[in-house]
Amino acid sequence: GITRHYELHVKLQNVTRLCHTKSMVTVNGQYPGPRIVAREGDRLMIKVVNHIQNNISIHWHGIRQLRSGWADGPAYITQCPIQTGQSYVYNYTITGQRGTLFYHAHISWLRSTVHGPLIILPKLGAPYPFAKPHKEFPILFGEWFNADPEAIISQALQTGGGPNVSEAYTINGLPGPLYNCSAKDTYKLKVKPGKTYLLRFINAALNDELFFSIANHTLTVVEADAIYVKPFETETILISPGQTTNVLLKTKSHFPNATFFMTARPYATGLGTFDNSTVAGILEYEAPPNTLHSIKKLPLIKPILPSLNDTSYATNFSNKLRSLANAQYPANVPQQVDKHFLFTIGLGTNPCSNNQTCQGPNGTMFAASVNNVSFAMPSTALLQAHFTGQSNGVYSSDFPTNPIVPFNYTGNPPNNTMVSNGTKLVVLPYNTSVELVLQDTSILGAESHPLHLHGFNFFVVGQGFGNFDPNKDPANFNLVDPIERNTVGVPSGGWVAIRFLADNPGVWFMHCHLEVHTSWGLKMAWGVLNGKLPNQKLLPPPADLPKC
Ligand code: C2O
């Protein structure tokens, strides 16, 4: 591979959508941020410069960061944030990965506007395992807030209530014609008849899982989270925050006498309020030149999307996702397990900490937890403490590996919904084979949680509804061709089982990619120890690593 250099300047820029202009934190003045393109095997050296008043850090979502945890990006986990006027060079090599990923800010809610596509092409000369597309387009979903997202979350955290929701969803930064004062801000996908296009979908929205469809067209899913999958056809894709999905779009063989809407709107199962609006873009066929004036276009055709809480659609869709699992792209599912974990994930409450009444349930503050531990952010980077062996006062290694007080997770919630708060890690020896069951608790309502793991891909070996049964459910696990990914939707009122090999030394964050749940504490971290061989050890920190 080669070394590729990029510079990302995090800075304010006036941006107008829905007739509302605001000063927005952007990358290089762009929303969404610029595309980063590399090939498998390349080294990326990305200089991030902070021109704003807030601290920042950037995460390369889905990049494995083998031994290079210092470049992973989550603030106070793998690095102290980059302070105003400072810069940091994220330096890492892309090993054994190709496909669509993205980058985003990883501090507070800055990722709502600081994000962009990260596209990893196969090695030079290596073909896709499907027909070569005529063209490729990244299609990134986001959320537009008229207000400053930082103000929204800090207000919510102070009052203990749920944050305000977005005003619009966006496709490549554009809300489209279904919103007021937005028709000119419409994404247009221009295609020719009879061709195959590769669409690289990214859900960079803060808080919403999305259904997406293009009217009168079928999509062939070929990749998820930068892993090739067994191709399958679908009218609609479901994509959760933190997930990426590549599809092939075959255009009609003749110029159609119509244009087509592509739309996305939420899949939502929780009890809270959410932005129930629809973003639309337009699929536009280029007419053959000599017919340009003679064609009268019929009106736009809209796709039909599954209903808002269509969990059975969501389940069927995720069941269709299978690793390619062939000789060239094997699925290296760990067949033996060294350590079994059961983590409950869900909402809960904290006592009201200000002297008024809080706006969470029964005057409390909303919280969220993993095994009832709501993660407390440290004030210095965990990875540094782990590397130097000075964890005292920073974190403890006693994260509960099983629920402390088991209960019926899908029946009546326990009377006490209070979480405990702490900065706790699970520490694993190098190369531990892990099986982790993630169980939705349904406290304060059943809800689908897109759980994201840093530093690894994992295999989704099983999923189900109700309570996970350790005596029955493992018999049905798929250890042959399960989907391999970095973000999985834990079903509303159900569980998923994942497996991964802890072959990447460092400290790795795991959290719900619904940003409001992360803010409330639905997050934890794994510490993975060095192996014995030199190439099994975390690299030393770079000289320009930011200080707290
Ligand atoms: Cu895409 Cu920890 O995040």
Image: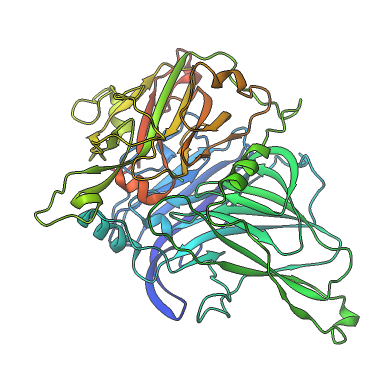
26 lies above or below 419: below
204 lies above or below 405: below
Q: Is residue 542 visible?
A: no
26 and 470: which is toward the camera: 470
The quarter of the rendered structure image containing the C terminus is top left
Q: Is residue 278 left or right of residue 12?
A: right
Q: Residue furthest front?
A: 412
For residue 458, what is the image quadrant?
top right
Horizontal and vertical percent for residue 262?
Answer: 66, 65
Q: Is residue 323 left or right of residue 134?
A: left
Q: Is residue 252 visible?
A: yes
329 and 420: which is toward the camera: 420
Q: Is residue 410 left or right of residue 76?
A: right
Residue at the spot x=56%, y=67% of the render? 279
Q: Residue furthest bottom?
A: 293
Horizontal and vertical percent for residue 100?
Answer: 61, 47
In what quadrant does ligand 1 lie? Answer: top left
Horizontal and vertical percent for residue 370?
Answer: 35, 34
For residue 185, what is the image quadrant?
bottom right
280 and 99: which is toward the camera: 280
For residue 44, what is the image quadrant?
top right
144 lies above or below 468: below
Q: Is residue 84 left or right of residue 239?
A: left
Q: How is the image coloured?
A: rainbow
Horizontal and vertical percent for residue 37?
Answer: 61, 51
The quarter of the rendered structure image containing the N terminus is top right
121 lies above or below 295: above
544 and 380: which is toward the camera: 380
